[in-house]
Amino acid sequence: MSPAVDTRLSPAAARLVRRVGFGLRPEQLGMLTSLDDRGVAERLLSAPTPPDPWGDTSYTVGPNDAGGTRRRTALAAIARWTDAIVATDAPLTDWLTWFWHGHFVSALPEVKNPQLMVDQLRLFRSLGRGGFGDLVTAVTTDPAMLLYLDGNDSTGAAPNENYSRELLELFTLGHGAYTEADIAAGARALSGWRVQRATGVASFVPRRHDDTPQPYLGVDGVDGVGGVHDVASVVAAIEAQPGLATTIAGHLARAVVGPAVDDDTVEAAATAFRSGDGSIEAALRTLCIVVADGVDGGGVVCPPYPWLVAALRSTGALLDPRAAFAQLNAAGQVPWFAPNVSGWPSGAAWDNASTVVARFTLAVGIAAATPADAQVLAAAGSSDPNDLGALLGLAATWSDSSLAALAAVTDARSRLALALTTPEFITV
């Protein structure tokens, strides 16, 4: 039976559930609507870390294995993660994992071994809500990152600057907060880490390292040696920069509150970050409460992968992973296959012909694979399309144009497919 229209989520709750929770599962609707908006935020924030999606399965691929084997193994690992997100009642951990995957970018074509990408996601799952310094330290010596940004080949005699540059420009402080000399100094201080291809383990090789203290970011006396000389001193110098909190809070705020988030909201999250000694959890909590209290920084255009997960959570559909990922590839976003170190685009960049066509193809497949007894399918066949909107987690009624389009379709599965591609479902 489809729900009454008055059981729909409030605007604030709907934003929270989609922006940090990968969307609504219909059986959650009654529980979530029994809470006030701050209660929904607390429910999301307090959920325990869900079980590891990959268990004891090995996704190691040898250097001599064919590319097809690598890709099949990778898609199997991504499918396991996707299935876990679709099924979980505690989605925040994996939402943050996805957020950090798009921030500290590594990609399989350079890393080669899917197991290393799995291990990097595990790193994000375990450290993604803790201290930012701990997260940066772990990422810096993570095997996938060492391979992706050439830290594996960096020595004291020939330091590679790729990771040192992106650490400052993309991962922490932002463009303009450092000099070329800082990049060179950081590269020397971070040299000496090496990944054993046979085991996928990273270790420090002293003979490949330059331990000479280097001036860095205007900070002297780090570790009492007059400059940076290793991973710990580099991270400490970055943490000492006044702008770090605002930069990281801004990245989180644009994802949680919206792309036009105001400066006061960003600063509130930055203050929580600083007060918690770089606590990601404190900044995230501040932003979720702000959204619960009604602050909205504008609509977030849902990229293809989170949109797919939200659609699967709403419908209970089971798709063939190969077909699903083929369409995600056409749409421009498959986990582990970011186009460059900057990650995927955001906002209006996803409003393009190839993405629109791929979304619709996926939506048709999702609707066809939705179980016959699913609540959402019954709602799609209801005389009132607003029943369907409620089960999809929408806060408001459909726009006139969407309502007219939905009303013109009588077949329940076709109406469901159309609903999944409306602006109301794509923009959250």
Image: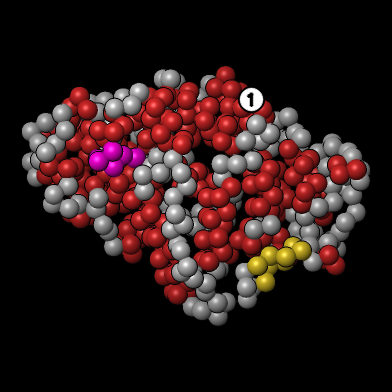
- Of 224 and 99, which appears nearest the observer? 224
* Residue 110: x %, y % from top left: 58, 64
Left or right? Give the position of 4 relative to 286.
left
Viewer can see residue 247: no
Amino acid type of the residue tagged 1 in the rendering: Thr
Left or right? Give the position of 178 relative to 147.
right
Q: Exactly how many numbered labels are in the figure?
A: 1
- Of 223 and 229, which appears nearest the observer? 223
Q: Is residue 27 magenta?
A: yes
Relative to 207, is 231 above or below?
Answer: above
Relative to 9, is 211 above or below?
Answer: below
Q: State the residue at coordinates (28%, 28%).
A: 33
Left or right? Give the position of 110 relative to 414.
right
Q: Is residue 175 magenta?
A: no
Locate the N terminus by quadrant: top left
Relative to 108, is 243 above or below?
Answer: above
Mark 1 highlights which residue? Answer: 271
Q: State the residue at coordinates (9%, 45%).
A: 411
Relative to 406, is 367 above or below?
Answer: below
- Of 97 and 264, which appears nearest the observer? 97
Q: Quadrant of residue 197?
A: bottom right
Crowding at mark 1 (Cα within 10 Å: few <14, some 14-19, many 20+): some
* Residue 206: x %, y % from top left: 83, 65
Viewer can see residue 57: yes
Left or right? Give the position of 324 relative to 346.
left
The stretch of residues the image draws in magenta is: 23-28
Could you say whether the residue bearing mark 1 is in a helix, strand or loop?
helix
